[in-house]
Amino acid sequence: MEDSANTVDDNPSPGQLPNGGPVARLPAELLIHIFSFVSDTSISISPVKPNYLQLGLVVVMHVCRNWRELALKTPNLWREIDANSEGGESPLKEQLLLFQPSISWTVSSQLPSPQVALLSQYTSHLKKLRIIDSDPRDHTGEFIEEVLTQPAPLLEELELSLHASRRDGDLKALPSDLFAGQIPHLRRLIIRMDRVPWLLPCISSLTELIINVNTRMNPSDFDSAFNPKYPSTESMLYEALCHMQSLRKLILVGGLPVPPLSSTPRMRGVAEMPHLELLHLSGEATVCDPVEGYIKRPATCELRLRCLLKPTARIQDVDFLLPILNGFSPLAEYVIHVHSFTTNSVCLSLVESSADQYREIAVHNAEWYRPGSTPHACIEVKCRAGDDGPPGWRPFPAFKKLLGAIPLAQVHTLAFNEVNTGTHRSWMSISAMFPSVQHLHVTRRQLGVLIAAWSSEMCDRWAYLAEFAAEDVRVNPGLVSLSIVDVDLNHTLDFGMPLHKALLKALVERKNAGLPLNRLSLIGCQTDAAWVKEIEEVVPVSVVAKADTAAEDALVENRILSRAHASDSTEYSEHS
């Protein structure tokens, strides 16, 4: 909970806090539920003149001393304290530093002197610290000397960030021996800056390292946004990575370390990370290649790569992705999800999942895609926004090249999300690469391609398509189910008739060709009971109005908890 108690009496006299009344003797379990409810519904407006009802938990703590002590000792009530708020030294904050060392503290290098003194006094108690530079001026000497040079033997999480509204400097003059080099329990380090201006001396204990050098910039522009005034030490990460054998999560977005001059492209598997669960790299393809190869990760590690191609790049710069995709077992079963396919980018995921386990989720739930399945790889190749890409760039050849490295015979599910380019013939050539596909998930554009492939009459109506080929109807001969996601089937633009009528004709022609479907799922589509009944005469239909409510509620709850408990935002990402 965010501290808003600076303007109330934080140390009332004993007479104000009677302990003998009935209210003071309520069971602790009940009181904690009351405190949690009040904490969740509290709203902090102004630290100068707070409204009584909006002080929330702070006011509840003034009922009696027992309530106050119980609240201070209950960890889940105190999530984050912003030490930058006005009002000087706060006894409540001092008590929280004693009772709740695991609370997340957000401070600025521009803290007032009393706050700096308070924080320096309790640096050895802190477990989570988030330092922002809300006004990047050169008045950071006192903060660095008083706080950042003190040992922090209990510190587990540290985040260093620039304020979102200012990008003209980093937290300056940070010492190389931060916290006097005494942070043996540091597990989580997050750096969000224009540059990585130093490297911590104690990194062997890290389990999570996140470096994002340009949070406000478009990821495709991160390479041109660095401030040249500050020296770069990204290349030092190569040596540092060798000492991070305990890492479980490594995220490097922008500013990837350029390999040292002594290294070669074959300098691979040097940094062993046997416990790594997530590796996320975003940067130029020529830099992603050596960094990914330098790290030796377990086969179950989730991999996310976002490779940027400049106009001066070569198409061959992304060839390092081929052995990565080829490294998946030819004996396992897979799902391929095409997240996006445009004229200047290709993004796809490969997930290991058996067809039997996957079937019910896939056809009944719009949230069917589960990136938590392992092993998992998400690959994106993207040209710089507004550019045509390097010489010879064409999305379909690049896409087919990536697919060619995957054991396609083992792919049982193929899903398309954002696809806004490509001819009928191009997509038919892609579909023909998947002889064993049993389940298709499509949106509007891909649905039109399938309808034209399965129905010669509909192909004639879709005038701008390439010439229909008779064998198209037999593409994906083992197809069992089709899921259509978020499509208005009453739409008439493509075929001169409602999409549901065109779909019915296509399903009939496919059935007459001896290739009937076992199931059609309409997920989040606009439907009508009358024509759904017509289609059911050809194939069983499942209509899912929305994503599974329980899953959706859980997703919302997780997002809320993530914002409350974590100091960074995910997906992932990314990458996700």
Image (spheres, grey):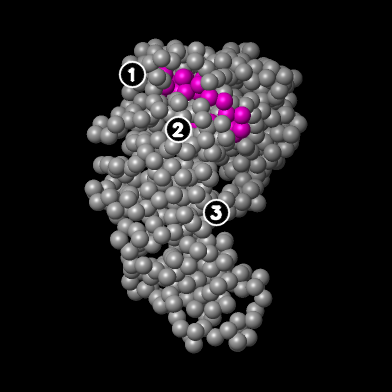
Which of labels 1 and 2 is toward the front?
2
What residue appears at the point 63 percent right and 13 percent down from the top-left corner?
Answer: 471
Q: Which residue is at a point 45% across and 80% down the rendered structure image?
A: 12
Q: Which residues are magenta?
A: 271-295
Q: Which residue is mark 1?
A: 311
Label 1 to label 2: alpha-carbon separation: 23 Å
Position above or below: 486 against 343:
below
Label 1 element class: loop
Q: Which residue is mark 2?
A: 252
Q: Amino acid at mark 1?
A: Pro
Q: Helix, strand or loop at disc 2? A: strand
Give, as a three-letter code, the residue at label 3. Leu
| Residue drawn 64% across the image and 20% down it | 328
Residue 304, given in percent of the width and then of the height, sits at 52, 30
Q: Is residue 285 magenta?
A: yes
Q: Which residue is mark 3?
A: 561
